[in-house]
Image (cartoon, rainbow, N blue to C red):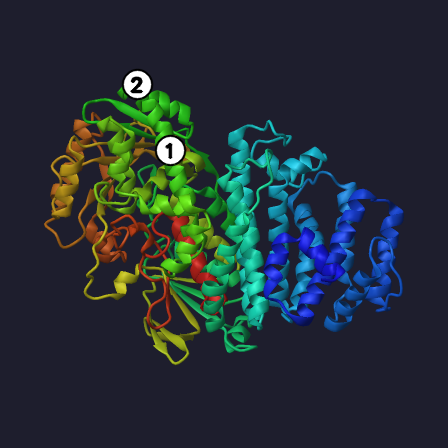
Amino acid sequence: MNDTALTTRRYGRSFYWSSLLLRGTALSSSYALYAFFRRLDDWFDSDGSVASMELARGVVQKIIVRRMEPVDAEACWSLAELQALHAAVVRHDLPAAPFFAMLEGMEMDQREHRYETDAEVDHYCYCVAGSVGELMALVFNARGGVARQAAIALGKAMQRTNILRDIGEDLGRRRVYIAAETLRAHGIETLTERTPRSAFDALMRAEIARARALYAAAEAGFASISAWSFRCCVMLMAALYGAILGRIEHECYDVFSARAVVPGWHKVLWFAWVAFVRLPRSLLSAPAAETAVLRRAQRSDRRVAVIGAGFAGLTAAALLSKRGFSVDVFEQQSSIGGKAQSVHEGGVTLDLGPTLLTMPSVARGLFAELGAEDLMPRLHTLDEQCAYRFADGSSFSAHSDIERMAAAASQFGHDEARAIHSFFAEAESIYRAAGEPFLAAPFSGMLGYGLRVAAGGPRALTLGLGMSTLHALACRHFKSAHLRQFIGRFATYVGGSPFEMSAAYAMIAHLERSQGVHHVEGGMGALARRLATAAARLGVRVHLGAPARAERVGDGFVVSHGTERALYDEVVINADPLTEVAPVTSRLSMSGHVLALNVPRRLALSHHSVFFSADYASEFASIACGLVPSDPTVYVCHPAASDSTMAEPGRSGLFVMINAAPVGGDYREAQGRRAIFSALQRAGVDVSPATIIAERTPADFARFGAPKGALYGALGHGRLGPFFRPKAQGRDGRWFAGGGTHPGGGVPMVMLSGRFAANAITHGGQR
């Protein structure tokens, strides 16, 4: 093993693992570049003098610019290392600019210990890592603008991963690589180990989302690497470095006690997943050296039609336009947003679809990637996440502060406070073991998903296999029927019964507690409109009042709307895949019956409230039979409690909802309306003389594209039910995005669904 290989093996563990499939000149050139930059970095860490910098510039000038063959060791490099570098430069015609950028990055390390703006951090990341990615793309013979930008994005993603992993070590050297403006945005003036945990965790979530957005952008260039071994190397490098972010999350963002490390056996599993799952799909989607798909992806005239302007459709459209595609969005309604419609009447504004935002880093990361951070609406983080009222008059409030929740739970029994801690600890374990791998990549089969779960260790596998129902999990932790009912409510987030749905849905409770419940200022409709503005800014054309349908014709699709017909290369359908199936035979999730009420006085209600029925099991049994429950649980959203823009003074707008059966049962809308008002009256909520300003029934949701009005599409029961979703790609090659496909319902999930569809099209079929 030569000098450069030994250096790589000793210091570049993730890179060395990724290089195992390389052969010949690509392998030797990769080792040469790694060894050259590693020696340079170590040298400058020990001797960052001006004289050293000039020596390094001289070496670059001679070997890179003038292509002079080295005859002796110089500065920190052996003769063998310099000869290997010279051979790589000549063989691949490597330019000098990335080498000088690296030197600039080394200088920045010597003189800059703080950065004011993220633009400065981004430039630093290019200098010390993006420049290396640029060179490696040439070594792998991936040339052109798409490949170059993707390689730079991967380098930046890896450097931002390093920054997050090494926060503790860097603070010890009085270095901070997170921009001051970013710290201030999270209420942090000076980053220290004593920074308040809530603020630091929020910062880490946002920065991890930023890094993952760069990894996603880098994937656009994978298809430009023709040789399978080169492509596998890059995929594995991205996977291994991306896994460091998962380890940081696994350690609850503790980057001070020890460095986050991906264990060796985890690397073996990642290697297997990349080599036997992702790479074969990638090669099948782009066979041969320079595929037609890749050539089309690098042309700005490749056309995509997105049918449906919900969050998923707008996300896919904006990302594709950002990546150079020509995109048209067709929406049958007169406004964008899909289910996220809003009503403005009589001095109140109300959402008629989703009413809260979780996992805010997904939305913020999307707007950041689109260059539209200025459009991201303000988020109000709710201290009281939801107020729960029980049939016997008792109450309980959920908070992100687990100690406050535990104290509130103690009213139901001395042991219930401890049970709150044990339940949320298990909910977090479920999320880490099963949820994170589920959200990390599209679900294309149990093999790929199982390998990602297995990377979490044997405990992750046993945890998944041991899951029962959500109600059974609640019973295992709580003696109180009240708290069991509280936990059971999270099954309704996906349209199911806690007595049938998997305990995996406990992860929703964890996500709300750990990442917060947020209100978008102006409502969710405002978020949809801002996203549409970001898409339009990137060149997306949105056609409202334009119902459209797509037909496969040859290698493309003909999209018809009205009397117009146009040819597109790809189509994204922002609708449930089950809408394409006739008849629908899958078991469906629940629907809902919604009333939007304008109350001519300001009510003393929390932002979110749930008024539980006396008999939860009986309620779900009635819904399963297609009936209106005699005593339904009622959810009430009162946005004016947190956002004064949602109602004029002296008024309250209420979004009121009960669960309902999909279209096809014996559901009576008038009976449902009476049940809502009766339930409010029993709960002591006086809304008279309220005006109904909007109503949504299961039949209405069916008209908006939900299969038979089922809000979450197919219902997955059983311990692994949550992880089986309808396939996102139809038989004719069209892509589906939205709550009916992977990863599921909820605004952040459908945004991820839109991202996965955009990635699939960008990569020629590989998501």
Image-based side of 721 in relation to 400, left or right: left
Residue at 61% over, 36% down: 183
Q: As drawn, is 128 to the left or to the right of 553?
A: right
Where disc 2 sits, the SS reads loop
Q: Is residue 446 left or right of residue 37?
A: left
Neighbour class for label 1 at 10 Å: few (<14), some, many (≥20)? many
Quadrant in the picture for residue 649: top left
- The outermost residue toward the left is 666
Q: Residues within 10 Å of mark 2 (few under 14, many from 20)?
A: few
SS category of the residue bearing label 1: helix
441 or 9, which is in the foreground?
Answer: 9
Measuring 77% from the left and 52% from the top, which residue is drawn there?
Answer: 39
Q: CA distance from mark 1 to mark 2?
A: 17 Å
Q: Is residue 375 visible to the viewer in this orientation of the structure?
A: no
Looking at the picture, tell me which residue is in the foreground, 502 or 17: 17
Amino acid type of disc 2?
Answer: His
Expressed as whole percent of the image width and height from the top left, the position of residue 574 reads 36, 60
Q: Which mark is residue 477?
A: none
List x then y, in percent, for residue 376.
Answer: 50, 45
Q: Residue at x 29, y 27 (%)?
A: 601
Answer above or below: position of 280 versus 76. Answer: below
The disc placed on residue 424 is: 1
Q: Residue furthest front?
A: 1
Could you tell me if residue 204 is visible in this image? yes
Can you say which quadrant of the picture contains the C terminus? bottom left
Task: Give the position of the N terminus as an image quadrant.
Answer: bottom right
Task: Give the total of numbered labels.
Answer: 2
Residue type, label 1? Phe
Query: Percent from the top left, x then y, of residue 321?
Result: 51, 63
With respect to residue 744, does 320 lie above or below? below
**Is 59 placed above or below 246 here?**
below
Residue position marked by numbered label 2 in the rendering: 414
